[in-house]
Image (cartoon, rainbow, N blue to C red):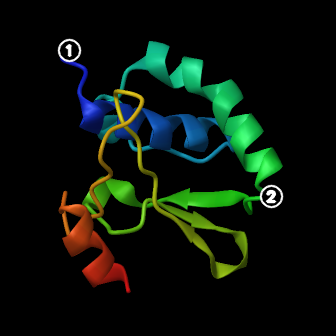
Amino acid sequence: MRINNETIGICCEIAISDYFGIKVDKNYRKRGNEEIEKSLISIIKHTFNINSIPKPVKLISAKQNKIDIKLENNQTLSVKSNKKELGKAAPQVIGQPSSRTFFEKIS
């Protein structure tokens, strides 16, 4: 299996789901990588704890939603990841824009 940014993102979503006991569709799980998923658990635990992120309750990214995970209190989480340390994040609404386009879209 080729590991790319999409694979890493899927692994993050699956690892979050596994850590919080959320069901993951078997076909979606096949797109991940168990070794990477397991390596992310300590990072996920730390990140959720230090940032007081509400508990995830449902994975909804499998159907190309703009939101990846539903959280408690009607909040949502969109997971962004990169294979390398300093890469671009690509919000589904605007793709991988230049910094100028990014700031025009979000302001």
Nearest the eye: 68 or 5:
5
Q: Secondary structure at mark 2?
A: loop
Is the residue 52 above or below the residue 104 in the image? above
Q: Residue sitting at 74 percent across and 63 percent down?
A: 54
Disc 1 crowd rating (10 Å Cα; few below 14, some 14-19, many 20+) is few
Estimate the x, y position of residue 23 in percent, counting from the top left.
Answer: 54, 46
Disc 2 crowd rating (10 Å Cα; few below 14, some 14-19, many 20+) is few
Nearest the eye: 65 or 43:
43
**Horizontal side of residue 49 vs 6, given as left or right:** right
Which residue type carries mark 2?
A: Ser
How far is disc 2 from disc 1 in space, using C-alphas?
A: 34 Å
Q: Secondary structure at mark 1?
A: loop
Q: Residue sitting at 26 percent across and 82 percent down?
A: 104
Is the residue 94 above or below the residue 10 in the image? below
Of callouts 2 and 1, which one flags the residue occurring earlier in the amino acid sequence? Answer: 1
Estimate the x, y position of residue 43 in percent, counting from the top left.
Answer: 66, 31
Q: Specify whether residue 14 is in view.
A: yes
Q: Residue furthest bottom?
A: 107
Q: Residue furthest front?
A: 100
Which residue type carries mark 1?
A: Met
Quadrant (top left/top right/bottom left/bottom right) for the C terminus: bottom left
Q: Which residue is label 2 attached to?
A: 52
Q: Nearer the viewer, mark 2 or mark 1?
A: 2
**Horizontal side of residue 40 vs 45, given as left or right:** left
Q: Which residue is label 1 attached to?
A: 1
Estimate the x, y position of residue 27 in percent, counting from the top left.
Answer: 29, 37
